[in-house]
Image: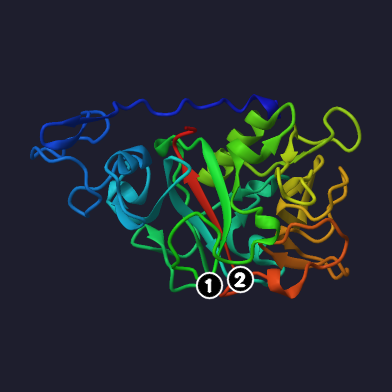
Amino acid sequence: MLDKWHKKEKPVFTGISRGMGGFSFGAAAAADDGGGGSEDGTQGNPFTSIANAYAASATNGMHYFQNAGVNSGTAFQLRYASYDNRGWVETFVSAEGALGTPWNRFLSYVGGASRPTLIDYNLSNGGLDYTSVGAVVTLGTGFNIVDVAITSKSSKTGNGVAATGANQQSALPLIASDDLAGTEAAQARQRLADFFEGSATGFSIGGYVGSSPVEDYAAYWSKSGSDPTGPFEIHLGFREGSKTTEEFHLADGNNSPGSTYAPNIGWRNTDQTYQGASVGSWTSNSAHKAEAYDIDSGNVLSVWLSDSLT
């Protein structure tokens, strides 16, 4: 059943203590590299979890990570950021506004399936290739991803989760654990995390479940303090029971349940007036969002993942 994607538990690690010599980290917070030193994010001593990078007070920017399930177990670089009292890594970046981008670049309907899978796209030594127009790396289950942040950046190589690109109503970043509402928000949050780590297929969420139209989860984006607050839906190459090669909405563009139109965040591949590729918009209307919100080199769609909820 679609609503039985299991919820992962966040990793347990010991806290930081202050001793006579300053800060020290518990053994589980920063693994030993075999030579007596703790993980520091260098190529020779990479972080083995996002939580370890946060515990080590890693600076925002590029650091080496390592996991047996990624890059054949060889250390690779990810862009790391501290935000909302936890660590995040960027695994998806796109400056490409072509309407067919998701289906031509980073989605695969394996074996003719109705739901797509996110796949690696434009990698460099196992991490994102920031010289390309867009890139995606799937981390798999080994990093125990439990949360997703969606934001805009003014350049592909910008650091940090806080939005630096278009950001209407200050709605970005969208944090799944904070900004998804509805009775199945927790399930939708974990399914979104699983999709972006590459272990689950595309899905559809909105205000309806068990009625018409049918969504996978009774959940939606609702952003307190913004106008409108929502609800906005998610349709990731799949909408209300059917495959779609037209909609890849991280946040759709109409706050009436079941109505999508031009996306606030994502791509709509159609020849209708509501076509578009946008990030940073936060309005409810049917037409293409304003040009200021087009995905391009100065307004980049960026997705970050975390292995902690607190």
Residue extending furthest left?
35
User: Which residue is depicted at the point 71% across and 34% down?
Assistant: 181
Q: Position of residue 208 (x, y in %)?
A: 84, 34
Horizontally, residue 212 falls left or right of residue 247, namely right
Look at 49% across and 45% down and name the residue there: 305
| Quarter occupied by residue 15 | top left
Report the amino acid beneath label 2: Glu
Q: Secondary structure at mark 2?
A: loop
The dot on residue 78 is none
Assign a secondary structure to mark 1.
Answer: loop
Residue 265, how many percent across, how many down? 69, 58
Q: Which mark is first along the chain, 1 or 2? A: 2
Q: Which residue is label 1 attached to?
A: 133
Question: Looking at the image, do the residues carrying marks 2 and 1 touch, with CB atoms under 8 Å apart?
Answer: yes
Q: Is residue 59 above or below residue 268?
A: above
Looking at the rendering, in which quadrant would you find the N terminus? top right
What percent of the width, then of the height, locates residue 167? 64, 61
Give the labeled residue for mark 2.
Answer: 96
Q: The disc labelled 1 sits on which kind of residue?
A: Val
Q: Is residue 260 left or right of residue 86?
A: right
Q: Gap in Å between the C-alphas at discs 2 and 1?
A: 6 Å
Left or right placement of residue 251 versus residue 177 in this view: right
**Residue 82 to residue 12: above or below:** below
Q: Is residue 169 above or below residue 144?
A: below
157 and 77: which is toward the camera: 157
